[in-house]
């Protein structure tokens, strides 16, 4: 983990890091650069941290949800990218990312639809592409893949194209 | 001696005078092609007039489906437009119904989700029907050949008559493909296609 607030960081970023620092162990800083901050949270604290960021820090919408596969660790990382419309000029340029590592053999995560309604389709796509199950999501049906898709989710590292040899 | 030879060559290279010789030197090749074409047409028309008439009717009234799957459709737009103008070859996009169409031009990438739809479209068209695969993606998958989501070649789903390589092909190449397809139709047997 890098150091919390480096001296060249702008004031708004420092304020956000200090505010999230009040949560203590629940949110760990991954990196902090101008315009980009990333925190890591545990699966059970995700909803609470998201609510805190929405209510106290005025990050009022989610721009993106992404999933990454780490086969060596046996983990998936789900990242929510949050932005602000109403937080003023300083906050509007910042993208705040919250990442959550979950085990690959138990890929479950509580949904953030109630906190950030704009993740509805992003979570559907992430669930389809990486196989993470968002508990409490209203509809996790097929979205982008063909209706007759029977293979594992295609963005996992273990996915192989049918008809291809290993290592090709 | 050299000067004399040069002079004689120049005399030989001089254009022949008007008369019977000029037919072979200037208008000869054009006339020969015309006579050859006429012989072909007359032979076909006399040997099998029904086939000739049916093919002639199909030849210059190809109606492509309005189905644009990827970015090659921009080149298709240029082909249909006034500059390249495929309509002068008898090819005009049909916007009404699939029942009026007899040609599918697959414009570029076909995803695996699109593949059954493409087959439905092909099945809804009446016989006889032809398919042109346009662009590298529809021939082999192109740069997406190892994607989980892209069909590696539309000939896995529908039979293709003419392949037009390119990324995307120039409008002249597509017009060339139309002329190739018309050649194919001209020499086809109606008993097999209908």
Image (spheres, coloured by chain):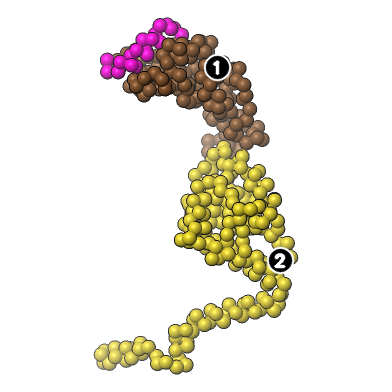
Q: Are marks 2 and 1 on the same chain?
A: no
Query: In the depicted view, which residue is nearer to us: A150 or A46?
Result: A46
Q: Residue at x 57, y 61 (%)?
A: B91
State the mark number for residue B190. 2
Q: Residue at x 52, y 24 (%)?
A: A118
Q: Is residue A5 left or right of residue B172?
A: left
Q: Residues within 10 Å of mark 2 (few under 14, many from 20)?
A: some
Q: Residues within 10 Å of mark 1 (few under 14, many from 20)?
A: few
The quarter holding residue A144 reads top right
The correct choice, above or below, for B6 with respect to A156 in the image is: below
**Magenta region's main secondary structure?**
helix
Is A10 magenta? The answer is yes
Looking at the image, can residue B184 be seen? no
Q: What is the number of callouts on the image?
A: 2
Q: Residue at x 70, y 50 (%)?
A: B123
The quarter holding residue B18 reads bottom left
Whole-percent x, y for residue B103 in the image:
62, 57
Figure chain in brown: A
The correct choice, above or below, for B11 with respect to A72 in the image is: below
Q: Secondary structure at mark 2?
A: helix
Is B192 magenta? The answer is no
Colour given to chain B in the rendered image? yellow
Q: Chain of mark 2?
A: B
Whole-percent x, y for residue B59 in the image:
62, 66
Tell me the residue that label 1 is attached to: A114
Whole-percent x, y for residue A114 in the image:
55, 17
Magenta residues (range): A7-26
Looking at the image, can residue B84 be seen? yes
């Amino acid at each position: 983990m890098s150091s919390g607030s480096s001296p060249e960081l702008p004031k708004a970023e420092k304020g956000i890091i200090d505010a999230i620092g009040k949560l203590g162990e629940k949110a760990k800083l991954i990196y902090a650069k101008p315009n980009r901050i990333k925190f890591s949270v545990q699966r059970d604290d995700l909803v609470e941290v998201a609510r805190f960021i929405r209510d106290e820090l005025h990050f009022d919408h989610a721009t993106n949800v992404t999933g990454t596969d780490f086969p060596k660790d046996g983990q998936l990382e789900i990242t929510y990218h949050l932005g602000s419309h109403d937080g003023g000029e300083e906050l509007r340029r910042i993208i705040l990312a919250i990442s959550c590592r979950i085990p690959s053999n138990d890929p479950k995560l509580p949904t953030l639809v109630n906190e950030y309604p704009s993740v509805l389709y992003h979570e559907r796509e992430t669930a389809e592409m990486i196989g993470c199950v968002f508990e409490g999501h209203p509809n996790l049906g097929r979205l982008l893949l063909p209706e007759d898709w029977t293979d594992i989710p295609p963005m996992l590292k273990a996915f192989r194209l049918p008809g291809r040899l290993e290592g090709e | 001696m050299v000067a004399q030879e040069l002079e004689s060559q120049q005399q030989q290279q001089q254009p022949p005078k008007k008369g019977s010789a000029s037919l072979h030197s200037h208008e000869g090749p054009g006339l020969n092609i015309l006579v050859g074409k006429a012989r072909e047409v007359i032979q076909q028309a006399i040997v099998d007039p029904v086939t000739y008439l049916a093919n002639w009717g199909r030849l210059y009234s190809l109606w492509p489906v309005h189905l644009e799957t990827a970015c090659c459709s921009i080149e298709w737009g240029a082909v249909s437009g006034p500059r390249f103008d495929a309509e002068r070859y008898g090819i005009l996009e049909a916007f009404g119904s699939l029942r009026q169409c007899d040609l599918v031009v697959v414009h570029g990438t076909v995803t695996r989700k699109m593949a059954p739809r493409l087959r439905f479209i092909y099945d809804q068209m009446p016989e006889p029907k032809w398919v042109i695969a346009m662009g590298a993606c529809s021939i082999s998958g192109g740069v997406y050949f190892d994607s989980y989501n892209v069909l590696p070649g539309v000939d896995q789903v529908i039979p293709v008559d003419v392949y037009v390589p390119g990324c995307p092909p120039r409008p002249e190449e597509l017009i060339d493909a139309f002329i190739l397809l018309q050649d194919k139709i001209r020499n086809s047997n109606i008993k097999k296609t209908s």
